[in-house]
Amino acid sequence: MMQDINVNPNYIRIFDTTLRDGEQSPGATLTSAEKLEIARGLMKLGVDVIEAGFPAASPDDLEGVRRIAIEVGNPLPGGEELLRTVPVICGLARASKVDIDKSWEAIRHAAHPCIHTFLATSPIHMRYKLRMEPDEVVDRIREMVAYARSLCEDVEFSPEDAGRSEPEFLYLVLGEAIKAGASTINIPDTVGYTMPDEFGGLIKGIIANTPGIEQAVVSVHCHDDLGLATANALAGIQSGARQAEVTVNGIGERAGNTSLEEVVMALNTRRAIFGFDTGIDTTQIARISRMVSNYTGIPVQPNKAIVGANAFAHEAGIHQDGMLKEQTTYEIMKPETVGLSRSRLVLGKHSGRHALRAHLEEMGYELSKEDLNLAFERYKNLADKKKVVTNADLEALIEDQIYQ
């Protein structure tokens, strides 16, 4: 599904890492069968790249990635003409030959394989985690990207903790990675540290100062430790990045990753501002969200943007009245756009007459103005005493009013 960005410079690749970074959420371990099912759902959704896992992590992970590469990373028999609609299948690898070999072993049967290798570049990571000098880091990156490129035509390189790396060092490192054969340069804000203006400035600086950057696609990978993952990703896109690395429901390490549905719908809803396209079938968003939540056991918070249970729910009387008159008064997108059937007007103590009348009509009751006013007063008394007013409560209330 990946378009040539040189042909359409306004196309944003969606790189989904739900099966790799998303699975790193505590307690989110997936079986190989579940991963395969999610990968099929992601293909139907229209993502450009599926990062299927970290093959060196375990034999089971390697086998899971291999199955996805074979079964999702190739057209169905007789469907060779659909080759361009098959997603890239990517495997993560540390900057070591052992990891890179395992990644290649897992993904090599895909029609469009990609090796994604990484090494930290921030002073704190180089000193305390890697215990390497900067020149050693540069040498390792140069060597391992070249090795990955000797196996696979498509290589992505990430300077881990780029958000806390020295910009001048990043320009050097990324230039060497491109020279060694990297076709995508991914910029991770690994610990969710940067602000949107800061991250956008980082991307601009990389594009302006990295030797050979015009030969590579610039990608962004943000985390939500300060609640800014989506904002940072969008800032990166506005600053020149043409790939966004995301997860369904925003699951991932610690506070999570950039949410696929938020980035896609921001680009979709505010197209006049961004002017970018994706290959995502947005009507599949709700379905893949439910699938990922069910398989990982991670519930979607009710007020989660786009896919939360309350994302298209309205309780306040003023809002309900506006919604009944014109949906766009309180909704910036239609629920059908993301695969939901309709908005919900939730009856609660804040609801008004208009919403109550509409709900009663759906239940088959048509009341006169006088009867509606009486029913509304009784309803408000009940709503003050109960957190949830059910249809059974309303039936009892109306039947009692009719037959009293």
Image (spheres, rainbow, N blue to C red):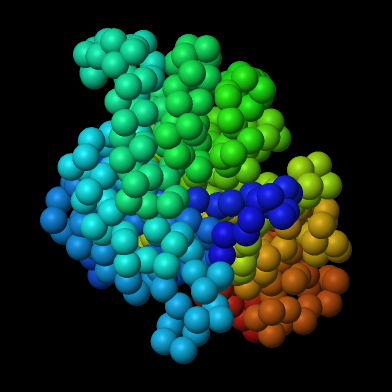
Q: In which quarter of the image is the N terminus?
A: bottom right
Q: Position of residue 249 (x, y in %)?
A: 47, 51
Q: Can residue 166 be seen in this view?
A: yes
Relative vertical location of residue 50 with respect to residue 190 in this rendering, above or below: below
Work out whether residue 363 or residue 331 is closer to the camera in this orientation and state it: 331
Say which residue appears at 77% left-offset and 81% top-offset: 366
Relative vertical location of residue 345 with respect to residue 127 in this rendering, above or below: below
Q: Quadrant of residue 110?
A: bottom left
Q: In which quarter of the image is residue 257?
A: top left
Q: Is residue 241 left or right of residue 189?
A: right
Q: Is residue 285 visible?
A: no
Relative vertical location of residue 83 with respect to residue 22 in this rendering, above or below: below
Work out whether residue 185 or residue 316 is closer to the camera in this orientation and state it: 185
Q: Where is residue 267 in the image (x, y as percent from the top left)?
A: 70, 48
Q: In which quarter of the image is the C terminus?
A: bottom right
Work out whether residue 19 or residue 324 is closer to the camera in this orientation and state it: 19
Say which residue appears at 37% left-offset and 52% top-offset: 152
